[in-house]
Amino acid sequence: MASGLQLMLLMGPMLAVPVPAPLTDALQSVRVTTSSGQASGFQLTFAVSARSVIQQSLLPLGFFDPGIRVVLVAVVTGTPTVLADGVITQQELSPSAEPGGSVLTITGEDLSVLMDMRHERECFPGLPHQARVMAICAKYAMYGITPVAVPPVFTDVPNPLVHIPIQAGTDLEYLKAMASEVGYVFFLEPGPVPGTSLAYWGPEVRAGLVQPALTLGAGAAATAETLSFTYDGLSRTQYTVALTEPTSKVQITLPVPDISLLHPPLAARPSVTLKQEPVPDLSDRSVAEALLLGLSRTSASADAIRGTGKLDVLRYGHVLRARRLVGVRGAGLAYDGLYYVSSVTHDIRRGEYKQSFTLTRDGLGSLTPVVIP
């Protein structure tokens, strides 16, 4: 790899360990995709030949079989970052008559795919959302998964005499369904130590430490190769909930609370709201459940500003991480400031490390006077 960049590859049935040197030498490229609220994926490409260790022993012995665990760690300027921790879901061998043209491609997903393998039917009497999340994630502790569940904005503890929450589906389906109900996300974050992951169930984190700024138009000091922005005026929607008072049967229409209950604002001037819609599917729901569902719909449409770009990690000096904040400068008064990194794609080849990314924000103008490098 290039100076300042090292890539560590670990594999194994349950516990991933460093792979043999011939396999590291055969690795041609790595792609890892991380998105907020979605499973991360990875793809590894190896050069193979008829007499290579891959063809002679590793493939026949099941070294690349589906279910094998894979951990990828990038070390940039001495700082290790766990890019992926998951399992293989597919392998593809492409033989070629051209010398050096044969390749083996390994595709996989993060460890959340293990939560989507079996249909479960469980009852959770008297347990709020966060307690159900902790109970489900505890089943995967052997994979180094540590759960973190943030209580919803409006607490709704089900009365066992009236309603008992029932899971009828895979663990992953149920975790995501509960997150969608309250405007939250669920995902697995690999690291910080290889072989461990954080199972996060809560709102998108839009506070805390900010990653080094993406700088535009600064010549040799620029850190982003490209970055463009789009303002979608039809993205943001004001949702309302219609509730029926049980005694008088009078219907009351309430606006959904401001999204800042879940997401602290990142822009000085929020995007305008041109659309208004009622929240559907509110039958047999309590007031707290109705408001949580409305809050979920509002959070999904809050970000009207979207930025897409590319950078060279070796020039940037850091690995840009998804699901965190980053500063932008050099884009002008309207678009400078802090953004939420909603997705990142890592492309690693010998001698280079590129990233494609997507940023989102709720409006125009920066809330900070300057963007810290």
Image (cartoon, rainbow, N blue to C red):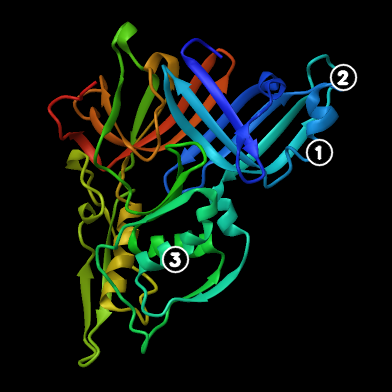
- Residue at position x 46%, y 28% from top? 356
Instruction: Indicate the secondary structure of the residue bearing disc 3.
Output: helix
Alpha carbons under labels 3 and 1: distance apart: 36 Å
Instruction: Indicate the secondary structure of the residue bearing disc 2.
Output: loop
The numbered mark, 3 or 1, whose residue comes first in the sequence reads 1
Alpha carbons under labels 2 and 3: distance apart: 53 Å
Question: Which amino acid type corresponds to the residue marked 1 in the rendered image?
Answer: Leu
Q: Nearer the viewer, residue 304 or 261?
A: 261
Q: Which residue is mark 1?
A: 61
Q: Dot 3, crowdedness within 10 Å: few (<14), some or many (≥20)?
A: few
Q: Nearer the viewer, mark 1 or mark 2?
A: 1
Badges 2 and 3: C-beta atoms under 8 Å apart? no
Looking at the image, residue 298 lies above or below residue 80: below
Q: Which mark is residue 97?
A: 2
Q: Quadrant of residue 368?
A: top left
Badges 3 and 1: C-beta atoms under 8 Å apart? no
The numbered mark, 1 or 2, whose residue comes first in the sequence reads 1
Q: Which residue is mark 3?
A: 135
Alpha carbons under labels 1 and 2: distance apart: 25 Å
Q: Nearer the viewer, residue 183 or 174?
A: 174
